[in-house]
Image (cartoon, coloured by chain):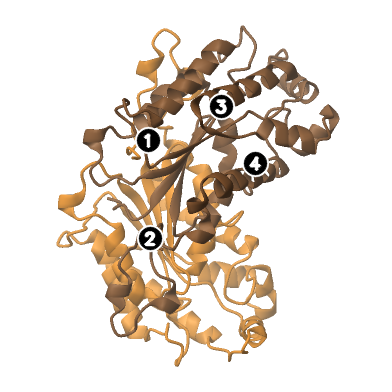
Chain colours: A brown, B orange
Amino acid sequence: MAATVQDMIMLLGDSITQGGWEPHGFAQQLAYVYNRKLDVINRGMSGYNTEWIIPVLEQCFAKKNERTNLPNIRLLTIWLGANDAAQLPTRQHVPLDKYRANLRTLVRTVTSPDSPRYSPEARVLLLTPPPMSETMWARRQAAKVPPRMLDRKFDVTKAYAEAVREVAGELGVHVVDVWTAIWERADEKEERLAEYLSDGLHLTENGYKVVFEILMKAITTHFPEMDPDKLQPVFSYFDQIDDDDPRSSLQRRDAFGI
Amino acid sequence: MAATVQDMIMLLGDSITQGGWEPHGFAQQLAYVYNRKLDVINRGMSGYNTEWIIPVLEQCFAKKNERTNLPNIRLLTIWLGANDAAQLPTRQHVPLDKYRANLRTLVRTVTSPDSPRYSPEARVLLLTPPPMSETMWARRQAAKVPPRMLDRKFDVTKAYAEAVREVAGELGVHVVDVWTAIWERADEKEERLAEYLSDGLHLTENGYKVVFEILMKAITTHFPEMDPDKLQPVFSYFDQIDDDDPRSSLQRRDAFGI
């Protein structure tokens, strides 16, 4: 069984998080820059909304009496809304007020001292869903067999992104505002979203590059101790291994122990 | 703290394993195809040889009395030799006989019932080091400040790759023969290695694509139960969530439990 040698970054979300393991996806890029320092664990579940992800998060965070030997989660990203914002009768739809309540539940599961899963060492970032393109998504839906109707709207996803910012402000959690960053880079023109969205909903490589860029900016600004350049590798660089006593110099260290 | 919800694939090695988190690297590709089924943990350490990686492996596998709550390692890849094969006075050099002995120690740490870290559920694959290009590596060494001498030879690395095959045969462990696969794809011509090697030693995207291809072939041939297409996601596909009782259908499952 795997002994704990590194703490973790956990990515919680829907298909846009799940796709983070694509080449240039934000999970791949995080794993690359945090290599030998923090492990990256992807808990993105395609199609999930905030309602369904609550029991997932509960199962991914250990309760106080079940923590023996387990790694700390140093950073949790919570990134949902693209499916919650789907329109009825799509069963993934979660009404806006319920979406806000679910985001609060997700954050408090980790940050509230009353929670059995309270994890004061875990930094939390809330990400807004990306802007969606009705034109692109309508085309994608029509191409499915059987064809489907357009089930998402630009303005609705925009309102869900706004709700993330509101809840984050209310709870004192930092936001990584993917919606605004991509919309501004697209010069606020729907036709320019094709550079960042593959099908009107999911991200291209360029979309993930924007996410990684603003995520790293949020980390280094709000949690400077988590800047990967300020962490040390858990196992020494090879040129620091002591030839006379290699075993001692190969004892694992705390990545944050510089 | 992170509760265990998925078992793991652990990648043990040197810089060529560490670089597996690059876009199209073999770690990224494994994480992508095993998403929601098995987590991928990279324990590649740039510059390490088999001698230095032994204490690392020992710290990465839990002893029998320290396993509470921890995830199983379902697959361990052991991929070293590129540094062991460096020539004296390079301090990474490990003589060929010692290299063979170290590979045996690494494998037996996991597979021997006498080992405190015996893990019968862990499948083990030994990878051969890639062929190296003296021309490319000499150029790279000369460009360093101060310039360095060529410290690796094509024929020596070839002998270390052969040693991996011998030890694997002796121990009954399967081999992923990176050396042969890349050398054959390069039509056994050193000048064609540039498609697979970035600097004469490390892999390009195309090099990693070959590795991923033959690694997946080894998995599906020798351990068909680990074929990612035969595993189920630990958390249900969203269209299988029960609207009447979502919590029950969102209980985590064994990926191998189909």
Name the residue beneath numbered marker 4.
A211
Chain letter of the residue beneath label 3 in the structure image: A
**Residue B165 placement (x, y as % from top left):** 39, 72
Name the residue beneath numbered marker 3.
A169
Give the left or right position of residue B117, taking residue B257 as reference.
Answer: left
**Residue A180 placement (x, y as % from top left):** 71, 32
Whether residue A168 is situated above or below residue B107 in the rendered picture: above
Name the residue beneath numbered marker 2.
A257
Measuring 59% from the left and 89% from the top, which residue is drawn there?
Answer: B148
Tell me which amino acid carries mark 3: Gly
Chain letter of the residue beneath label 1 in the structure image: B
Please say whether residue A197 is visible from this viewpoint.
Answer: no
Image depth: mark 4 or mark 3 in front: 3
Whether residue B50 is situated above or below residue A68 in the rendered picture: below
**Residue B175 placement (x, y as % from top left):** 41, 64
Q: Do pointers 4 and 3 mark residues of a single chain?
A: yes
Residue B255's tag is: 1
Chain letter of the residue beneath label 2 in the structure image: A
Q: Do pointers 1 and 3 mark residues of a single chain?
A: no
Image depth: mark 2 or mark 4 in front: 2
Tell me which amino acid carries mark 1: Ala
What is the distance, in whole Å, between disc 2 and disc 3 at their CAs? 31 Å
Tell me which amino acid carries mark 2: Gly
Give the left or right position of residue A71, taking residue B227 as reference.
Answer: left
